[in-house]
Image (cartoon, rainbow, N blue to C red):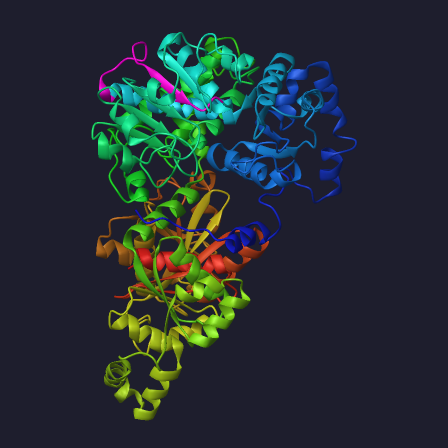
Amino acid sequence: MTKSKVTSEEALAFHLEPTPGKFEISATVPMTTQRDLSLAYSPGVAVPCEEIAADPQLAYDYTNKGNLVAVISNGTAVLGLGNLGALASKPVMEGKAVLFKRFADVNSIDIELDTEDTDAFINAVKLMGPTFGGINLEDIKAPECFIIEQRLKEEMDIPVFHDDQHGTAVICAAGLLNALKISGKKIEDVRIVLNGAGAAGIACLELLKAMGAQHNNCIMCDTKGVIYQGRTEGMNQWKSAHAATTDARSLADAMDGADVFLGVSVKGAVTPEMVASMADYPVIFAMANPDPEITPEEAHAVRADAIVATGRSDYPNQVNNVLGFPYLFRGALDINARAINDEMKIACAHALANLAREDVPDEVALAYGKNLSFGRDYIIPTPFDPRLIHTIPPAVAKAGMDTGAARRPIIDMEAYEQGLKSRLDPTANIMRGINARARANQARMIFAEGDDPKVLRAAVAYQRQGLGKAIVVGRKDDVKAKLIAAGLEDATRELEVVNAANTQHLDLYKSYLYERLQRRGFDGKDIHRLAATDRHVFASLMLAHGHGDGLVTGATRKSAHVLERINHVFDANAEGGAAGITAVLHKGRIVLMGDTLVHEWPDDKDLANIAESGARVARHLGLEPRVAFVSFSTFGYPVSERAEKMHLAPKVLDARGVDFEYEGEMTVDVALNAESQKNYPFSRLTGPANILVVPARHSASISVKLMQEMAGATVIGPILTGLDQSIQIASSTSTTNDILNMAILAACKVGG
């Protein structure tokens, strides 16, 4: 499997641009008029204050408490980096906060407490209790983490959850349930060996024992060997609770005949000999990161019957905490829970295990570039399975209600599940799917503008992320100098740099170009100048001759100029069936706009062609197309000859018998707003449109740029469609990430 590489420069740039950090605060109420401010603050705010003072439960109605989690750390155990301190832990905690939002639509804010004093830490968190609906403790070293969590759970009336302990335990338990099901064993009967007596390891054993594992069947090991009854060296109260009656004294002793190995320790802790000594159908969860206790390849070399999981995304069966904590808190918050108890964690584990046994949706298989089905290499759901949001929280919420942890039980569980589905951001899964398809395709991508630092950074990222091979058009010494200036000196040996001077194909390119252009007023000198000195033409000729699989250009020149140059090699024009479709992503919605690139003033037939191009792009993105022909009029009113073609375009599609929904003409609000659509029950659209076909290129461009500048929408495109080859034209204002996205679209042949 191709492994992606993230450089230090990329990581720092990601955290620096477009603004420092990873999230910002946005208002959910209008804040424009004096009346708005009077309601938001003084005097209007006094009313909910008085209501909450009379009934504290109303804080969940009138404030954001019910969907707000604090991610709190003192930085004493940051990732695998050790005690970096509170301030240096902030990037990790910000990252955890955005994961809450991305996966479960839970608002979260990071808080770093600059103290290693347990009592001071506990007191600080306890005093913040009124603000939050839940507390997620993170990266706090043992044994302090045990003391802190236990006391906070006792003294606070909201969920307190140390994810390093319980998040790992829940996912581990889910995977183990399925591994045992496949191997035909029961948790009550199996012998389990755990290596790593820290926070995560102890939590794993505690949860498995709560689920039925027998105390003396569970052997815990640390750096000094087996934790057995009577051992005194290196012990504490948390280890002592798991001391077993056993003659085993080393990890190797414990592994002999064991059914299950759980590792939260260090690279290489398990040898092939230890694996060979295990019972039939051994289960091995080697969860040390970034390198497991034993790799799946090493384990399978001695035991083909082994079921292996790791903490890494480049192996099957990843034990990933993001499968647990967002959904545990989602379910807990939605019942205003007092705590996240063992029953809720066990319900989460069972729900995850059951989900892995179900048929995997096509979009998940597409995103991962392979078919997934329950078995030895798929015992845990993938983090990007869209069903997680509406299957795990209901199970957690029900367990919370059944055990009395809920202050506000859910009455209509079916309606709750439907509401959870609406929280899923479809754009994130779409982009994930496109990236996975690009990685599977391994396209040789031509970056035409090798003299631009943004393009070079995008080319390096494309190759290092394992998406395929990057080919840069430019002068080698210039490319090298710009890479060095960008802090990417090591990439000078990685990229293939091609130009007219070092290619062996220039005569072939010139001959091909002359054949195309000789009757359009171009002589031999013109052809040489175009092929040898114009990078857009040269790159297009490379693509035309199969010397690359895709092309991205346009970052340094206006799109009209670039399109004209590409037209020398390909029929990238309206007559040739080309169109530009731009994707606008905003607040969890994606709308495709066309044509933003090719057609200046399309007629009704052109508009129908644009609609078909938009439908192709939509399907490549995993969307079911719904096209609206938009104007300032709706179904003939007000009457205008300017809107006539928008009225006629659907009739063209009627005659063609296309296989997607379309309707028009209509105003944008009727196209996008389900409530407005109810006024037109005869409309053929079954829901809000996701493709808008507009009257002219200028209106398309204005609409897209207005959304981008005023609403902060993410814009991808225009996506060039209708060509035999895969070409994408970036905008001259593109960032490195924008250029990379266009390369990924080209690699996936979106719109082709």
Location of residue 364 in the rendering, given as x and y in whole percent from the top left corner? 32, 39
Answer whether residue 192 is magenta in the image.
yes
- Residue at 30% in and 18% down: 258
Q: Nearer the viewer, residue 116 or 433?
A: 116
Count every numbered label the image shows and give the total.
Answer: 0
Residue at the farthest right position: 43
Q: Nearer the viewer, residue 443 or 611?
A: 443
Residue 649: in sight, yes or no? Answer: no
Residue 133: in sight, yes or no? Answer: yes
Quadrant of the snapshot with the C terminus:
bottom left
**Dividing the picture into quarters, in which one does residue 24 lie?**
top right
Location of residue 419 in the rendering, given as x and y in whole percent from the top left corner? 45, 28
**Dividing the picture into quarters, in which one does residue 378 lie?**
top left
Location of residue 185 in the rendering, given as x and y in whole percent from the top left corner? 25, 15
Tell me: residue 199, above or below residue 652.
Answer: above
**The magenta segment:** 182-197
- Residue at 44% in and 22% down: 169
Task: Examine the residues drawn in magenta and state their main secondary structure.
Answer: loop
Answer whether residue 279 is magenta in the image.
no
Location of residue 242 in the rendering, given as x and y in whole percent from the top left corner? 46, 12
